[in-house]
Amino acid sequence: MSPSEAREKFRSGLRVPTAGHCPGWTQANLLSLPREFAYDFLLFAQRNPQACPVLDVTEPGETSASIFAGDLRTDLPAYRIYRDGALVDERTDVTALWRDDLVSFLIGCSFTFEAALREAGVPVRHLDAGSNVPMFRTNRECRPAGRMSGPLVVSMRPVPAELVATAVRVTSRYPAVHGAPVHVGSPGLLGIDDLANPDFGEPVEVRPGEVPVFWACGVTPQAAVMRSKPPFAIGHAPGHMAITDARDAEYQVP
């Protein structure tokens, strides 16, 4: 499918995780905040670029972006609604909740480099299983900015030990979509007690001879919303991304 075809399906009510959708087209995390919080979040993202790599920012009230020709209110498969930091609703259309003061941020997503991992021979377990990627809050604090603070969130992919160096090399070429891993090996060093119980997404099997590898994740902004408690925010449901009109290759460096 093309991005426009995928967005039309989501607009019609299809709700699925988007990993593996529209190969070659960049996927992005969404966070929409009232204008009064937009600068604080932009500064938060600038101070934490690996977790929050900003690909595009809208003017207040805009419902599309330069890399997203669809409608930000309807063209993602699922959204999460926050009030005072609490998750209060999850829905497939946020048109009725949209406000003229909302500034939307499109943030890089690690789904963008998964095709490159597979091409290099690195398995991507959640794609093979047709499930959502597992994501975890960590004990690492992001650098705060203004009223925004929160923990780093990571996604995890099990990688055969002999291919870890390949996974690092491949993903380091995509710095605008989280880049190289932030941690390899013991999840306990990140404060993660149980890989079978992710905070977001779905668990995947870690097989003998495989190493859990962790990348910074674009759900980090929503963890910051939960911590910082702005009066209102809209985000994507984790793993249910905005499929943009940008190409993965645009974010690859030599």
Image (cartoon, helix red, strand yellow):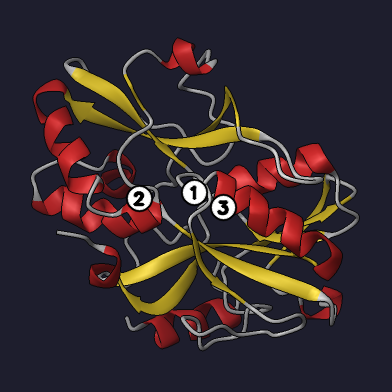
Camera-nearest label, 3 or 2: 3
Secondary structure beneath dot 2 equals loop
Q: Earlier in the sequence, mark 2 or mark 1?
A: 1
Give the amino acid at mark 2.
Answer: Gly
Which residue appears at 21% of the width and 57% of the height? 115
Q: Residue 94 is drawn in which quadrant? A: bottom right
Residue at image location 21% in from the left, 37% down from the top? 168
Q: Nearer the viewer, residue 56 or 199?
A: 56
Q: Is residue 246 above or below residue 122?
A: below
Q: CA distance from mark 3 to mark 1?
A: 5 Å
Question: Which residue is denoted by mark 2 in the rendering?
Answer: 130
Left or right of 70, for residue 123: left
Kindly identify the amino acid type of the residue bearing the numbered disc 3: Gln
Q: Is residue 40 visible?
A: yes
Tell me, yes or no, whether the two marked residues, 3 and 1, touch with CB atoms within 8 Å. Answer: yes
In screen coordinates, is 146 left or right of 245? right
Q: Which mark is residue 49?
A: 1
Label of residue 46 in the image: 3
Residue 134: x and y, percent? 46, 37
